[in-house]
Amino acid sequence: MTIGKLGVAALLALTPLTAQAQTRITPEAFLDAVLGKTVDFHDFRSGDLVGTEEYLSSTVSVWRREGRGCVYGQITTPNGQICFLYDDAVEGPAVCWWPFEYKGKLMVRLATFADSEIQEVRSITEDGLNCPSAPIS
């Protein structure tokens, strides 16, 4: 069996977390932990803040990158993934993640092997993002 260059790159990208125990969790379990809350996501490797997401319901969230405005998204949970289709992605595909726990922390891994981006939940608060025109449903 041959893996190919892309497969080797994907396996190498997984190495830092596969050496330690990690546990996949369902998208529903992830949503249960964050529903009605605001979550800060940080890049696992650099520690930089990627953005903050407020989970308004199990189907609607609002995302804000540092220094940018708010973007509302529709949440779906196909095939064990949690996916977001944001208002600013006019015809683009949904952004999908595999949620998991690593050393007691909530994490998400981009659900594509072309990019092994991993984000860590650093804080979960009751504070809202105070974004205008929040949809109700």
Image (cartoon, rainbow, N blue to C red):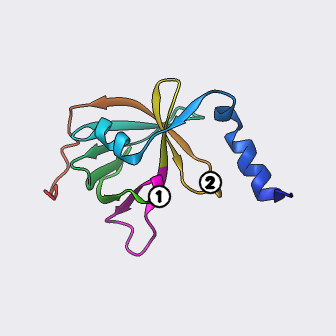
In the image, 132 versus 82, the foreground residue is 82
In the image, 117 versus 49, the foreground residue is 117
The question of residue 65 being in magenta is answered with no
Residue 5 position by quadrant? bottom right
Amino acid type indicated by mark 2: Asp
Q: Residue at x 38, y 56 (%)?
A: 77
Local SS, label 1: helix
In the image, 66 versus 137, the foreground residue is 137
Q: Residue at x 73, y 46 (%)?
A: 11
Residues rendered magenta in the picture? 79-97
* Residue 20 spot, x, y in % from top left: 64, 27
Which quadrant, please, contains the N terminus?
A: bottom right
The question of residue 88 being in magenta is answered with yes
Q: Which numbered mark, 1 or 2, is in the foreground of this view?
A: 1
Residue 16 position by quadrant? top right
Amino acid type indicated by mark 1: Asn
Query: Circle 1 is placed at which residue position?
Result: 79
Comes first in the chain, label 1 or label 2: 1
Q: Residue at x 21, y 40 (%)?
A: 36
Residue 136 lies left or right of residue 105; in this view the side is: left
In the image, 94 versus 129, the foreground residue is 94
* Residue 26 spot, x, y in % from top left: 42, 44
Q: Residue furthest top?
A: 103
Residue 48 position (above or below residue 137) = above
* Residue 18 spot, x, y in % from top left: 67, 34
Query: Circle 2 is placed at which residue position?
Result: 115
